[in-house]
Image (cartoon, rainbow, N blue to C red):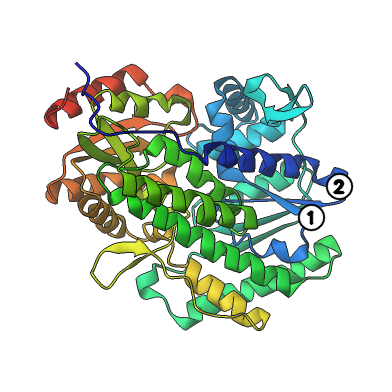
Amino acid sequence: MEQEAIYPTEKLKCWNKAKDIRMKFYQDYAEAHDKGGLRWAGGAWTFDAIPAGLGDDVYPITSEPYSATIAFDKELSLECMEATEVKGYPRDLCSYMRNYWGSIITDKFAFGYKDGEFVPRFQGAKPISFPKPDFIWQDHICCSHAKWYQVVSDLEGGIPMYTVDNAVGPSNELTESKIKYIVEQLKDGIKFLEKTTGRDYDDELLFKAIWNHFVSTSTWAESCELNKAIPAPLDEKSIYSLYVLGTLQKSGKQVADFYEKDLLPEVKDRVKRGIAAVPNEHVRVMSDTQPPWSFLSIFRYLEKFGCVSIGSLYTFGLIGQWEVKKDGTWGAKTIPDVEFSNRDQALYEYVKYELHKPEWQHFYSCHLKSDMMIRIAKEWKLNGVMLHYNRGCEGLTVGIAENRLALLDAGFPVMAFEGNNADEREFDEARTKAKINAFMETLGVK
């Protein structure tokens, strides 16, 4: 018997607006050249405020969320994966990267037009060719980041590329020289952008973009912090559709405004009125790293047990910025109280702020990740943890066995399941549901 509902629930009022922002992002990128604008490609973690200084008609495509969109479309994803394998790229590489490369190799964009409307390919859109970027603006912290776009550049016939090395160590070892090391790279990068595009750089546009970045990342964290409430106002499956806006363009005004003026007030109101994401909430868990995107139904399966996944370090800290508050708890990072007066100062504040990103820290030590996960488990009042042994993302999954042991030592039951975030051939849905059944039984729910 499923657990009975005990809390009121309702749909998010801002849901459709979030979907519209996402679709407009990809449409703007696809149609940029038609409007005389520029297109650039890079990762979701790149310093995306920098290209904003080239003008208001410069549109990015960020690789990870685009690849996740492909992964959701099983038919297209399989075609992309097989295309990369035919080219000789091995299956043990980042699955996001293989989806992205496959989209270029097959020359099929994940979006297209249906009856004049711009929609995802799986909704029946006629596929369009992959829109070629004018330049690549990337950073490097994960092992595949820079190499990802080196291949993209080669596949597209030699796209100009600039990569920033931001792997300078964890934030608890941050020094002035490490900050300035990245600042100088960004300054050189601006020169690269001017030379590549033939445009003059506008510092005022840069200042606005950095401020938007501060607002987006802090406000997203504040929204996730509200999930400490019982019942949780948001569930992780919904969170995936909301956090993605920050992965598309952290420095975009439309994203900053949505998080600050639409999402955060609504989540606060849901907490105030006791509105639950899962009306039969009895137990609370969190997950880890990217989910198997083509099998998000497993999160709905959890609800049959009255189980809500409140999020994860991944959804909280991939984009969100956090800090330890005076009472010792984790909360949204305070936006710097500063007014930019020149480029050097703005870049310095930008880099210093960004180097505290939670999901960057555990590239240096699994213990840093364990500490953050245990903190979430305690402060968000969890009954257990679900760990995705994700073969599709080595960077975020490295050290996960050590994380499991640390969580167990801290007293939290752990369920581990194997899979792949973007290659559906490596996920066993029936086996995973059987594991969930057993795990829920250990947590005392049916």
Quadrant housing residue 208: bottom right
Residue 43 picture location, percent across and down: 59, 51
For the residues labelled 1 and 2, the Cα–Cα distance comes to 8 Å
Count of all numbered marks drawn on residues in the image: 2
Residue at the far front: name it.
Answer: 273
- Contact flag, marks 1 and 2 (Cβ < 8 Å): yes
416 shown above or below 179: above
Secondary-structure class at tag 2:
helix
Q: Position of residue 78 (x, y in %)?
A: 57, 22
Give residue 67's position: percent from left, percent from top.
58, 37
The image's mark for residue 57 is 1
Residue sitting at x 71%, y 62%: 52
- Seen in the picture, residue 152 relative to 221 is either above or below; the reply is above
**Image quarter in which the N terminus is found:** top left
> What mark, if any, has residue 35 been given in the picture?
2
Using the rendered image of the protein, determine whether residue 209 is visible from the camera's viewpoint: yes
Q: Is residue 374 left or right of residue 155?
A: left
Q: Residues within 10 Å of mark 2 (few under 14, many from 20)?
A: few
Left or right: 354, with 381 as reference point = right
In depth, the one of 154 and 406 nearer the eye is 406
Residues 194 and 120: in front is 120
Tell me the amino acid under the disc marked 2: Lys
Seen in the image, is 431 located left or right of residue 209? Answer: left
Residue at (45% x, 34% y) in the render: 421
Image quarter of residue 84: top right
228 sits to left or right of 205: left
Residue placed at 81% from the left, 62% from the top?
Answer: 196
